């Protein structure tokens, strides 16, 4: 579903990837996409020859925004509205603007996207034709949430660390202590951080892999890396450091609230339920209680060395 309205024959391309999922962006040669911030730079790729196993085609269109009058609005939370027709339309709008400043038309397989940008997407202070990255947050996160539902994959609200090529995940909602815990592990040279707030989990053959994303938390750090998941640890702030295993039902109930799920689309929700069930069946799940300000890494290393 590539746009047919781009008449500029000198189109340009750009590539970035998250979790080995490659976004191939095509845009008019008459404009320039501004350089991304430092975090997004880690996910930029130079060509389609990257090792990605999945490709999402994105076209930037500067013509009129698509009409939504005949579509069903299925979600709204400022500044995002989502409509459904033969696919989906994602609209980003601000009360001060007469029209959305960015819209995305997505096909039913979520692998072809046309993004429409208003002049408000142009960066002030530059000459005409310099635009912000059209696929940046929250568009990229919404697209992946929809796309991953059919791929035994998902976006998890979790911090992640790794040691000896093994990833360990610490899911939790805002305020649970993910960034605090990751800072404590960062003080130990045996551990490396993946991300302290949002990870992409994807089934790759017989393994679940954890990938860094361009959406870090308080620490502002993320690494563009993918590693096999060896354990999931739901975290609690406590006055003592303690790790205990969780049964399958408790693990499932704790996982659902920290997974990015499009609740407005029942078929996709069903797919995510299947994904959660498979994840807690294959990956050991624990509850980790820790004391903020202390160093839990010694206790944690002793525990995982016995796994």
Image (cartoon, helix red, strand yellow):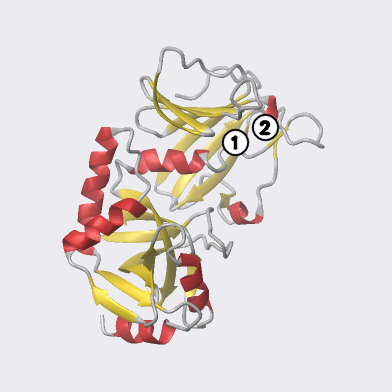
Seen in the picture, residue 1 relative to 242 is either above or below; the reply is: above
Residue that extends furthest to the top in the rendered view of this protein: 70
Q: Residue at x 45, y 53 (%)?
A: 51
Label 1, residues with CA under 10 Å away: few <14, some 14-19, many ≥20:
many
Q: Which mark is residue 134?
A: 1
| Tag 2–tag 1 contact (CB < 8 Å) | yes
Near-viewer residue (247 or 145): 247
Q: Residue at x 35, y 39 (%)?
A: 262
Q: Residue at x 67, y 32 (%)?
A: 121
Q: Quadrant of the C terminus?
A: bottom left
- Residue 218 seen anywhere in this rendered image of the structure: yes
SS of the residue at dot 1? loop
Residue on which the image places disc 2: 121
Residue that extends furthest to the front in the rendered view of this protein: 239
Precedes in sequence: disc 2 or disc 1 = 2
Near-viewer residue (245 or 195): 245
Q: Which mark is residue 282?
A: none
Judge from the rendering whether residue 241 lies leftward or rightward of residue 29; answer left or right. left
Q: Position of residue 288 (x, y in %)?
A: 33, 74
Seen in the picture, residue 65 relative to 294 is either above or below; the reply is: above
Judge from the rendering whether residue 120 lies leftward or rightward of residue 160; answer left or right. right
Label 2 or label 1, whichever lies nearer to me, is: 2
Q: Position of residue 66 (x, y in %)?
A: 52, 17
Near-viewer residue (20 or 183): 183
Q: Residue at x 37, y 66 (%)?
A: 169
Q: Position of residue 201 (x, y in %)?
A: 36, 55
Q: Name the quadrant containing residue 61.
A: top right
Judge from the rendering whether residue 295 lies leftward or rightward of residue 306; answer left or right. right
Question: How many numbered marks, from 0 up?
Answer: 2
């Amino acid at each position: 579903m590539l746009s047919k309205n781009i008449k500029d024959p000198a189109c340009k391309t750009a590539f970035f990837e998250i979790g080995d999922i490659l976004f191939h962006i095509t845009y008019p040669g008459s404009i320039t996409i501004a350089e991304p911030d430092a975090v997004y730079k880690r996910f930029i790729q130079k060509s389609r020859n990257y090792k990605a196993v999945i490709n999402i085609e994105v076209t930037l269109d500067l013509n009129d925004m698509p009409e939504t009058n005949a579509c069903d609005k299925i979600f709204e939370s400022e500044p995002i509205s989502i409509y459904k027709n033969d696919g989906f339309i994602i609209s980003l709008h601000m009360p001060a603007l007469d029209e959305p400043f960015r819209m995305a038309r997505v096909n039913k397989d979520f692998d072809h996207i046309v993004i429409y940008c208003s002049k408000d997407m142009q960066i002030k202070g530059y000459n005409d034709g310099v635009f912000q990255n059209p696929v940046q947050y929250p568009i990229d996160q919404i697209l992946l949430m929809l796309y991953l539902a059919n791929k035994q994959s998902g976006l998890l609200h979790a911090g992640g660390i790794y040691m000896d090529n093994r990833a360990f995940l610490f899911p939790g909602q805002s305020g649970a202590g993910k960034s605090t815990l990751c800072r404590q592990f960062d003080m130990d040279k045996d551990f490396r951080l993946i991300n302290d707030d949002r990870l992409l989990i994807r089934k790759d053959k017989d393994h679940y892999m954890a990938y860094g994303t361009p959406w870090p938390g308080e620490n502002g750090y993320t690494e563009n890396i993918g590693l096999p998941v060896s354990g999931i640890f739901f975290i609690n702030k406590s006055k003592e450091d303690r790790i205990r295993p969780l049964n399958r039902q408790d693990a499932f109930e704790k996982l659902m609230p920290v997974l990015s799920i499009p609740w407005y689309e029942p078929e996709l929700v069903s797919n995510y339920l299947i994904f959660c069930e498979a994840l807690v069946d294959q990956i050991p799940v624990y509850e980790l209680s820790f004391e903020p300000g202390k160093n839990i890494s010694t206790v944690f290393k002793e525990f995982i060395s016995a796994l």
